[in-house]
Amino acid sequence: MTPVSARAKPLNVLVVTPLGPRGRGGIDRLMDAVAAELAASPEPGLTCRFVTSRGDGALIESLPRMLGCMAAMVWLKATGRLDMLHVNMASHGSTWRKMTLIRLSRWLGVPYVIHLHGPEFHDYWRSRSAGARRRIADAFERAARTIVLGRFWRALVESEAPAAGPRIVVLPNGVRAPADPTVPDPDAPTILMLGQLGVRKGLPVLVEALGRLAARPGWRAVLAGDGPADALRRELEAAGLASRVSVPGWVAAPEVDRLLSTSDILVLPSLHEGLPLSVIEGMAHGLAVVSTPVGATAEIVEDGVTGLLVPPGDAAALAGALSRLLDDVDLRRRLGAAARAYHARELDLEPYVRRLAQVWRAAATPRS
């Protein structure tokens, strides 16, 4: 941890999150963790407030949330309690909600930080009209800082908004490490998937891969996350996997920790990702990770070192990687230990929050 002088100029930051406290999205979980860390170990001179821009209800319900965000910005600025705006930006509606808030921040004379986390933002940005692409680029180029999750995302912003380049900060997501690592079960290994139950996370591919392993004894799997759990259960039953694979649906943080601590393999065969928290959580717990090299995932999961990487959409390759780990408990242990060590060096929550605070302070410094 890099100490910050208690004499540092006071800084008031307003963080805009999409779903709010205990939201089911990865960025909401990350911001909850940031809020908890700052509450437990405050940064001298830093006051951080959080406001919700959308909420988890119907889309029409986001309008009052947006108006509330804007009112909060105006009120905090008027009362001398707004020095920096931090917006978490994804694609589609998130882009335009955050750009509305960015326009207001400019009008108020408040610098802003864009935290880019949308897993499909590259496709979204490049598929817009020329005018829309230019407006998005302008938002990035005027940002005091842009936080991206890895080199993949830095390259995107640099290519689409070149003037933003010098103010891009690569800051991978962070999670808190458990007190004790998971101990692999050599006799009955558990495969765990954490994430939205849908196509983007590779669920159809995973179900097919597990079907290829159906004749193998001993293993079980848990597929946990938000989405159509009943439909997935019916699909698993039709595939003859209902007795081997459980689908608890969305689970809260304590149950996530329990599942991680009682599993052996973390699998996430996504088609698109920013930098998935579940992979980082699996690494923190010392699980053997199987994932796809999408987004910035390959920047933390080194194939054969801190996990196994398989091509997106390839059920045969996924089944092969899982089979290797089911067969070889020593490989599971070696990958899990290396992943846990990498997390401790690069992805732990406490240094993540201190680095984020440093980004805010640097962003608040007027450009020369």
Image: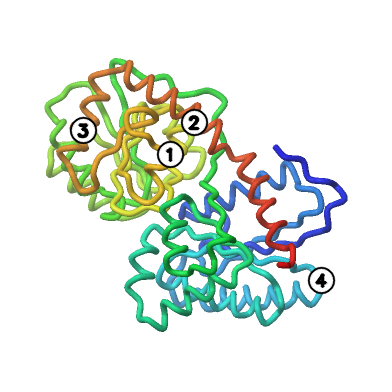
Label 1, label 2: how far apart the Cα atoms are: 8 Å
Label 3, label 2: how far apart the Cα atoms are: 35 Å
Q: Which SS class for mark 1? A: loop
Residue 61: give x, y in percent of width and height: 49, 75
Left/right placement of residue 3 relative to residue 218 reads right
Q: Examine the image and state in which quarter residue 269 appears.
A: top left
Q: Amino acid at mark 4?
A: Gly
Residue under numbered circle 3: 243
Which label was assigned to residue 186? none
Question: Is the residue under label 2 in contact with that under label 1 (CB below 8 Å)?
Answer: yes
Residue under numbered circle 4: 80
Q: Earlier in the sequence, mark 1 or mark 3?
A: 3
Residue under numbered circle 1: 300
Q: Examine the image and state in which quarter residue 199 appears.
A: bottom left
Residue 66: give x, y in percent of width and height: 56, 75
State the residue lying farthest toward the right: 7
Could you tell me which residue is drawn at 39 percent across and 57 percent down? Answer: 119
Label 2, label 4: how far apart the Cα atoms are: 41 Å
Q: Is residue 184 above or below residue 352?
A: above
Could you tell me which residue is drawn at 46 percent across and 39 percent down? Answer: 280
